[in-house]
Amino acid sequence: MKYILLLLTIGVFQVNAVNWALLVSGSNAFYNYRHQADVCHSYKTLIKNGYSPENVIVFAYDDIAQNRQNIYKGAIYNQPNKDGFSDNVYDGCVIDYSKTDVNPTNFLNVLKGNYDHLPDGHKFINSTREDNIFVYFSDHGSPGLIAFPTSYLYEQELMETFQYMFENNRYNKLVFYLETCESGSMFVNLPKDHRIYALSAANPYESSWGTYCPPDDIVNGKNLGTCLGDEFSVTFLENVDLGDFSQTLQEHFEFIRDNTLKSNVMQWGDLSFTSETIKEFFWGRKFLEKRKMCPKDAFFMNDENVSRWDSRDNKLLFYQNRYNQTGDLEDFIELEKEIKSRAYFDTIFGELQQSLKLTGDYHFALNQNCLKSVIEIFENKCTKLTDYGLKYVKLFGEMCDSTNLLQIQLNMIVSSLCMTE
């Protein structure tokens, strides 16, 4: 009798269990088109696979579809045309958090289920110990942080949130796919026994890459002038779109790793459940109809000839390409601004490295409070770190961990950097 009751109890939990997804594009501006394209593509994929819209939460600045630089108003594409399979991923993409609501505080509160700390009426993950959670994030990053439009999420903050979720039974299993430069650095301290499994688009000390970049950005016979997607993201999404849900998480990783050609995709955290199929995370629990599979020749992400851009150089290449195409004075001015901005960061951080005798090698900041402090000082006194400028955060990390200077002395050094501008 007890055995029967146990089986019935397990059955109830399985029926009531649901899948949740949190999809985040952390950037803004048209030259970062690819991040919102990735996220809207992922949203439409999950909905097609039977996810309940109420259980999918999307963060996106939402400045791309109607952007004046977008030749197809109201549309975003994550793939170029090929045999009619290019889809307007913005059509039907429900964005829950936009503009200034796209920030680390809201992101972490959504994960924790802290609805009373969120804007009124906004969605949050109301999960239980029986539910699986899929998190996908696409933007820029550097060792120990990932970027939002006006602020940063630090590795320590993410680990503390995961620990809170684990201790408060907020999930059954959690899968996190992260597309940023140095994305592996966000998972170096991820516990191996908390039922959290992560993939990073890159190892802790390299860039991730955009793909379907000019000249391979053609949609309906026209160049959009920007990368349509990110290599890691498009690779995993096109694979999921094929509809082969017999793949295990391990097989899915191996496919993504082997077909992401410009960076080293890595696994992190709890690998004990990688023998489970991707269906457990990319399908809705109540999906009844058989998923229509796309033909395997519909996508061609693994073509080594497809144009790819280093994410650190994306803005520069965007305006170089745009000016070459248009000859417009405004594009030339923006190109000149980016060239000068990169030179500025090269100069001031070169001086910092030389004055403190820093190695300039990859460095993950053990003292995250110090890292956060010096970045805030730099951005308040000097300038905001750009997508390119983030490459130098490793120097701040090394400075915090490798010198005997007090925090106030470090802050004074950082404040003085802007005087060289």
Image: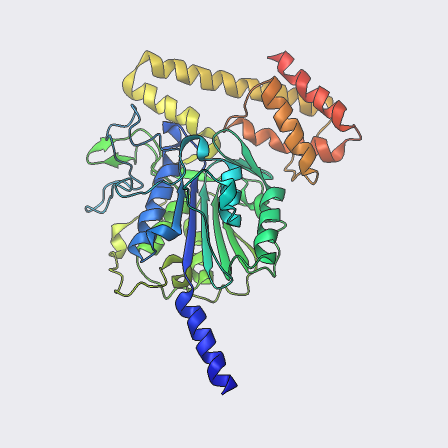
Q: How many marks?
A: 0
In this rendering, position of residue 132 left or right of residue 402: left
Is residue 77 visible to the viewer in this orientation of the structure?
A: yes
Q: Quadrant of residue 145?
A: top right
Against 82, residue 287 (above or below) is below
Rendered location of residue 56, percent (x, y): 38, 50
> Quadrant location of the C terminus?
top right
**Residue placed furthest toward the bottom:** 1
Rendered location of residue 415, percent (x, y): 67, 18
Q: Residue at (40%, 33%) from the top-left corner?
A: 61
In this rendering, position of residue 123 left or right of residue 181: left
Against 26, residue 254 (above or below) is below
Q: Quadrant of residue 98?
A: top left
> 156 or 226: which is nearer to us?
156
**Residue placed furthest toward the right:** 404
In this rendering, position of residue 50 left or right of residue 250: left
Rendered location of residue 141, percent (x, y): 53, 36
In this rendering, position of residue 160 left or right of residue 267: right
Q: How is the image coloured?
A: rainbow
Q: Residue at (44%, 62%) from the top-left corner?
A: 251
Q: Residue at (58%, 57%) from the top-left corner?
A: 168
Rendered location of residue 85, percent (x, y): 22, 47
Is residue 200 visible to the viewer in this orientation of the structure?
A: no
Against 259, residue 317 (above or below) is above
Against 115, residue 273 (above or below) is below
